[in-house]
Each structure stands twice: as C-alpha cells, then as structure tokens.
Image (cartoon, rainbow, N blue to C red):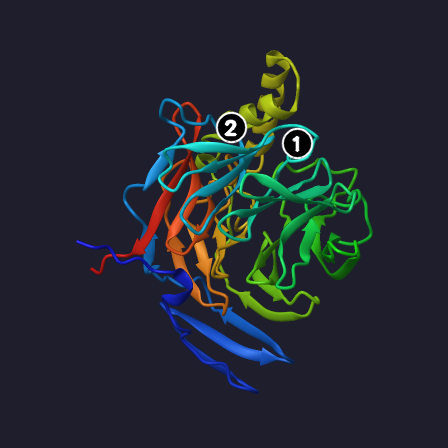
Amino acid sequence: MTRRVLTPSRVLILAAALAACGGDAGPAGEIQVQIRDSTGVRIVEYAGVPEVEAPFTLAAEPLYRHGANPGDYEFQFVDAGRLLPDGSAVVAWYSEVIVLSPDGATHEVLARAGEGPGEVISPYAVFVLGQDSVLVPDDRQSRLTLFVGDSVARIVNLPRAAHFGVAGIGSSGELMMMDRYPHRLWIDIEEEWLAGHMTLFDIETGALDTVASYDHYPRQRSEQPRLIIRPIGEVAVAAGRFVHTRSDRPEIAWRLPDGRVTQIVRWRPEPNLLAEELLEHGEAYNRALGRRHYGVSDARLEEIIQEDMDRYRAMIGQPIPFFSTPFADADGNIWLPSYRPAYPEEGSPYTVISPDGEWLGQVETPPRFQILDVTGALVLGVLRDDLDIQNVVVYELAERPRQ
C-alpha cells in the first residue's frame, strides 16, 4: 500500500480568519485562540496550550541510517545538517563536512579540516541553495564557502567578530545574521537583558546593517552564584523572515528583513519546573562535552562533572526554559524542541507552529534523536546509540493514521 506523505504547512488551514480592524476567536483543540491586528502586527494568542494532535508523524522505521555499518563515516558531535532536493544530505561536524547519498549507503567528504580554500575549522551551519550548491559558514575563519558539486565556487569573508553567525539567506541573497554568542559581558549590566542584534550582510559590498535588537542573555549579578540553567534569546530564519524567541517566555515573533514585526504568537503553559528525571543523562552529556572542550585530566573532568551535577540538582523544582533552540523547516514552520538539561538538542516532543501562527501540534521522536532539518516529507536527524555513537538518520514525515 502506498503511504501518502504530507508537507506540514499544507496540512491545516487557520481556525479563524483575521479581520481588518478587529479580531476573531475560535477553538484550537479545546483551547480558545484570539487573532487580532495591532497596528499592522498580527497577534495570535492561545488561552492555554492547545491539545492538538499533529496530522503528521515520523514513520515507524527510518529510510536509512548511516554510521552503524562497515565503511560508514564515523560521526561525533554533529553540529548541523540539511537535506538536498534529491534526498541526499550534507552534514557538518567539528571540522569536516560530509555528503551522504540519497539512500545513505555512501558518503563523500566535501570539506576537510584546515585553513586552505575549501577547508573548514568550525562549520556551525550549512545552507542548501540547490541540488549541487551548498553554503558553509565557518566562525573560526570568519568566512563563507560556496561549494558547487565538489568544487569551491566562491569564498566570502564574513564580519570578523566572534559573536556573529549566519541564521539564513534572504530572498535577495543577503545573509541574515544574529548573535551566536554575547557581544559583551552581561554581568552587572544596567539592562535586565543584554541585547542581541539581527543584521543583514551584503556579500557584494561588505555592508553590515543592524535592523533590530532582541533579548539575548539575562543579566547576572556578580554577587550571585551563576545558574547552570538560564533562559536565552534565540534567532532563526523562516521563509525569509527573522524569528526570535526567549526561552522563558511562551512567545514567538516574526520580523521582516528590515526589522519590522509582522506577527506574534503567544500561549499560556503551566510553569516548567526541573524534575529529577530530566537529569538522567546529564553526567554522560557533560562528560562528552568536557572531553571535547576542556582539555583536562580525567580526574579533573570528573570533579567538574560532579560540581555541575550538584548545581543542576540544586535547581530541582525551579523554573527552567519552556523550549530549546528553535528552527524552521523548508516550509517556514517553526519547530520548538522541548527543553532538556542533558542532551538539550534532543527535545522530543517538538511543538510545530505554522508560518501563520497556527498550532499544528507536537511530533514525538525516538529516544536519543535530534532533528537537524525537515524538508518536504523527509526529516534528517542524528541518533545516538547506547555507546553515545552518532548515526545520521532520515525518516519519512507521514500522515498520522486515522483512528
């Protein structure tokens, strides 16, 4: 029997239409939704958290899994990945970029570690422009490399500031950028939050234009102990618009490339409090990160891990972020991973909200799975086995069976 697959943004229509100078209310599951216009800004407000069953789900078995078979590439700490139009995938980790065939059976190294043309040191993202065109930003080298096929077509120097990162590509080819890291220290600042910046970068002229600011890092007082879990402001790009969130606030805002706010979605969840079971894999996660970043002895690493776990346990019962780092799929839907202190990228279930602000529902994923990209009817992700070895996996996004 043929399985019919769905593109998420085409699954549902809005429950209520926006009136020109007023609002409309309608049900979203059992939750009332209010949609109104506020001086040109579309505002969608849910009275709680809609209990909507997403009409799409991951298939029971993946189309392929690369990393577990003899001859497969051995991945560690995958940072980013994208699907290409033919179903193949490009994956970046640490200091290499790999292309997998559409069936996942073979791989090619697109970029190796190094500082020469076509080499990378820290490829934190990848962007697909077509079947054979891939853009790879490298924050350690402050440059962007365009690969066409397996060749370097162009290298562009990016602003030489460690905090800048490419969030997406605009409709006119401009780079839509955000602050990947704080641009200055947030200790004892006057403001409640250190501002981040949304900027446009013209790769032809080198012009950098700041179009908007957003809450990026919360202020910390020097006399107070540093919290190991804290909220953060994030920026993604969805269908040519900036999208920003603050993880302690159930709200998403969309902005045009010129910085103008066009839409805000809000909902009212119950407080999200840290529970002991969320720390189940915390030590393993900290240990893996420490081996990559700290450069200390095993004995010292264990001391650091136990100190961190004590700080986590001290926060049990306290509020934690509502979600982790958001991302957009190829249709402009926003995916909000559930927050996890351990392996924070593995945020099942994922809440999905359409470009028009409709609550599409939640998507459950397998344990130890992180979504990297959703394009059309395919989901690209990373699956960890019991030994913490990563495999790259592709699933179909299929219609949920009717009850």
Specify the label residue 76 is tagged with: 2
Say above or below: 312 vs 40. Answer: above
Of 374 and 190, the residue lying toward us: 374
Residue at the extreme bottom of the image, as rendered: 21
Position of 68 compared to 287: left or right? left
Q: Secondary structure at mark 2?
A: loop
The tag on residue 121 is 1
- Residue farthest to the left, as pictured: 1
Q: Nearer the viewer, residue 139 or 98?
A: 98
Image coordinates for residue 9, horizontal then vertical, percent: 42, 64
Query: Residue at horizontal 70%, vertical 30%?
Result: 115
Mark 2 Cα shell of 10 Å, populated few (<14), some (14-19), many (≥20): some
Q: Earlier in the sequence, mark 1 or mark 2?
A: 2
* Amino acid identity at mark 2: Gln
CA–CA distance in space, label 1 to label 2: 15 Å
The disc label shown at residue 235, or none: none
Q: Nearer the viewer, residue 84 or 320?
A: 84
Could you say whether the residue bearing mark 1 is in a helix, strand or loop? loop
Residue at 28% across / 41% down in the picture? 61
Label 1 is placed on what type of residue? Answer: Ile
Q: Quadrant of residue 146?
A: top right
Q: From the viewer's perspective, tell me whether residue 83 is left or right of residue 155.
A: left
- Determine if residue 94 is in view: no
Label 1 neighbour load within 10 Å: few <14, some 14-19, many 20+: many
Look at the image and tell me in which quarter the C terminus lies: bottom left
Residue 131 position, x and y percent, is: 48, 50
- Residue at image position (55%, 32%) is 313
Residue 159 visible? The answer is: yes
Q: Is residue 118 above or below residue 219?
A: above
Image location (x, y in percent) of residue 295:
66, 19
Which dot, 1 or 2, sits closer to the camera? Answer: 1
Q: Quadrant of residue 63?
A: top left
